[in-house]
Image (cartoon, helix red, strand yellow):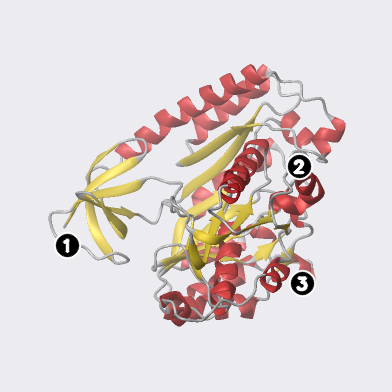
Amino acid sequence: MKKNQIDIITMGCSKNLVDSERLVKRFEEKGYCCVPDSHRPEGEIAVINTCGFIEAAKEESINTILEFVKRKEKGQLNRLYVMGCLSQRYKKELENEIPEVDKYYGKFNFKKLLQDIPDAKRDFITDRERRFATRARFTPRHYAYLKIAEGCDRHCAYCAIPLITGKHISRPKEEILAEVREQVTNGVKEFQVIEQELTYYGMDFDGKSHIAELIEDIANIEGVKWIRLHYAYPNQFPMELLDVMARHDNICKYLDIALQHISDHVLKRMRRHVSKQETLDLIAKIREKIPEIHLRTTLMVGFPGETEEDFKELMEFVRCERFERMGAFAYSEEDGTYSQLHYEDNVPQHVKQERLDRLMALQQGISLEIEAAKIGKTMKVIIDRKEGSYYIGRTEFCSPDVDPEVLIPATRPLRTGFFYNIRITDSTEFDLYGEIL
């Protein structure tokens, strides 16, 4: 057990990752050495930043807490703290069920956590402390996640996030731009712009979306090489954002837009406030404005009331639209949501799983064909890391951790965080293979 070391374990999405990065910076200012997501935690203190989005995420968070409780009982850990989405929503229940945790915090009150941990003896200055003014970073030096807002006002029937995070609150634009400039100074070339509902940015300012002007301002900052947009919403999509994307080469031809379903019957029950035809029209307009765009979407199967006909309609939608990137999950009933309060979870679990398997098998074949079409093309690739005999990189069409990567034989030295022209030589549904020109 290492004195003055804090192990930080982050569960869930990239938005939680940003919260942990900000927390680590404050810990380092107090004199602690922070280790993120270590496979062999050795610190005297552990902080677990939990996820509470769906049942599987809640179970993973609870199991992680219990693992660290065992370490504490064995004398391998002095203090254990829990924060984040799960404890934001279930603080009292967790305090009763797992009292071995020293203290629970929510998603927004981590300043209290900082007050409860005393200053450590300052016998070191970390590289992160020298380099970053406002936050540490767990990602490679050349890319960062940029969270532009918190919360959500959409209230889809199945989603617990508004119950956890509250109303949508946009960060001031100048604050965001200052962070971008700072991160560029610290070596960041690529920004993953994230929020729960990206296209809603600025609505709390004056009732209008300001995402297009924000992204344009970021694109105009010298040193910003790639910008990638995550978590758009199809209802009231700001079309001016497409014009901005078309104007700037450093805005990746990539858009993460969760559609969830296509059947009007299911969309209405989901309270998505968008129709099948509106969805089809939006996809067509996006592809018309940005011809090479790669769309990432998320779909749900097994929502209460989803019939086999609804599911067949969803399958046909995926077959016709041929999304470049797609994830899917089975409906999970979450406490306090509209669907939990008003609908019966009446699609059997084995049917949910069978539909999910069919949908993902269809997408796997589509992805295989889309990636194979890139063989022979020369693509701009940024190098993320080296693994064994390969350098691992990404094209502008690939977000870290979730999308295909480019594997390049390490026959000559390449530099992490630098761009290279790579000729694609082979592919699978999950990865590309290439050689440097």
Mark 1 is surrounded, within 10 Å at the Cα level, by few (under 14), some (14 to 19) or many (20 or more) other residues, namely: few
Dot 3 falls on a residue whose secondary structure is: helix
- Give the labeled residue for mark 1: 413
Residue 258 seen anywhere in this rendered image of the structure: no
Q: In front: mark 2 or mark 1?
A: 2
Q: CA distance from mark 3 to mark 2?
A: 41 Å
Give coordinates of residue 363: x percent, y percent.
46, 31
* Circle number at residue 97: 2
Q: CA distance from mark 1 to mark 3?
A: 49 Å
Dot 1 falls on a residue whose secondary structure is: loop
Give coordinates of residue 72: x percent, y percent.
59, 51
Give coordinates of residue 254: x percent, y percent.
47, 54
Give coordinates of residue 421: x percent, y percent.
24, 59
Above or below for 120 versus 105: below
Q: Give the left or right position of residue 370, taking residue 331 as reference.
A: left
Out of 120 and 338, give the one closest to the viewer: 120
- Give the labeled residue for mark 3: 205
Amino acid type at circle 2 is: Glu
Q: Mark 3 or mark 2: which comes first in sequence?
A: 2
Amino acid type at circle 3 is: Phe
Out of 242 and 84, give the one closest to the viewer: 84
Q: Mark 1 or mark 3: which comes first in sequence?
A: 3
